[in-house]
Image (spheres, coloured by chain):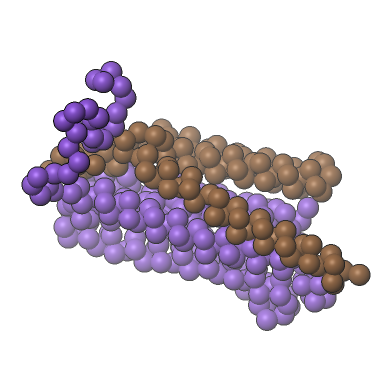
Chain colours: A brown, B purple
Amino acid sequence: MSVDNSRPADHPEIAYSNARSYIIGFVSTVALLGISLLLVQTHAMSAFNLLATISVLAFLTTVAKLVFLFHLDFSETQRWNTLTLMLNVPLLILSIGLTAWMFRTLYERVMMH
Amino acid sequence: MSSYDWGLHDPVPGPQTRLWDEADHEHDLMSTRLFGFWLYMLSDSLIFAALFTAYEVLTFPMSFAGGPTPRDVASPIYGYAETIVLFTSVLAYGMVMVNLKKERTRPAMAWLALSLAIGLGFIGMEYHELHDVALAGGPPQRSGFLSIFWAIVVVHGVHLAIGLLWMVVMLVQIARQGFTQLVTYRLANLKVYWLYQGLIWTFVYTFVYLRGSI
C-alpha cells in the first residue's frame, strides 16, 4: 500500500473524488427514497409487500451510496475497505435478524394471547 | 506469471519468493489511518444494529403502553424533507473533496461551511420534530417504544453534532495549515464519517418513518 505521498491531494483515496459521481449518488438516493415515500403514502400494496418493497429500495439506496459516494470497488486502493464491509454484513444480519426472530416467537408464545 | 493479475504489492510466487523485507520501509500514513478509521466506522454500525434490533423488539403493540405509536411520532413527509436536507449536506461535502483534490483552498472552505450550515439545518429540523413529540405526550419515558424511538433519533443526532464540530475544527485547520498531509487525511476521514451518517439515515427513514405509517 505504499504510494508517493509527497503531494497529499494526489493520494489515490483523494484522487477518486469527482463531482459527477457525487451528483449521481445524490440524485439516485433521493429518487429511490422518494419512490418509497410515494408507495407508502398511496398505500399502493398490502402491508407485507410494502415493507418488502421499501426494504429492497433501502438496499438499493445503500448500494448506490456505497458505489457513488464511498467509491467502494475491488481496485487496489479500495479492496480492503470493500472486503471488511462484506465481512461486517453477516454480523449485522445475525445480530438484528436472529434477535428479531427470537423475540417475535417469544412474544407469540408468552404474551400475545 | 507476469500475465497473472497480481496486486501491485502481493508477493510474486516462484523460487525467489521473499517472505519478509530485509530493511525497514515506510508506511503510507494516509492509507493506514483511512483504513483504521474505516474499521472504526464498521464497528459503529454495530451500535446502530443494536439500536435497530431494540426498535424491532419494542414496536409490538404492548410496547406502546397505550401511548403514541410510530404513526403518531414520525411523519414520512417531514422525514423526507429531512432526508433531502441531510443528503444535500453530504453532497456539499463531496464538493469539498473535489476541491481538495485540485488543492483549491477557498472553494473547499466555502463548500465545507455550506455543508456545516445545511447540517445545522438538519439538527434544527430534528430538534423541532422531537420538541413537538415531547409536547404531544411522547417523552422517552412514556413507553418502551418511545424510549427506543428517542434513542435512535438522538444517537444519530449526536453523531451529526460531533461531525459538525469536526467540520468547525477542519475549517480552522485548513485556514491555518492548508492542505498538509495531516489535514488531508482528516478531511478524508470526515468525508467517510459524514457519508456514513447519510447511510444510517436511509435506514432510520425507511424503518422508522416509512414503516411506521404502513
Instruction: Identify the residue at the far left of this view.
Output: B23
Q: Is residue B131 above or below residue B163?
A: below
The quarter holding residue B151 reads: bottom right
Q: Is residue A11 left or right of residue A49?
A: left
Percent coordinates x, y for residue B202 in the rendering: 58, 51
Instruction: Identify the residue at the far right of this view.
Output: A113
Percent coordinates x, y for residue A45 in the rendering: 82, 41
Q: In this view, does B134 lie above or below A18?
A: below
The quarter holding residue B132 reads: bottom right
Q: Is residue B182 left or right of residue B137?
A: left
Q: In which quarter of the image is the C terminus of chain A?
A: bottom right
Percent coordinates x, y for residue A6 in the rendering: 12, 43
Percent coordinates x, y for residue B191 in the rendering: 37, 51
Residue at 35% x, 56% y is B37
Q: Which of A16 and A75 is in front in this view?
A: A75
Residue at 17% x, 60% y is B176
Q: In this view, does B85 lie above or below A67?
A: below
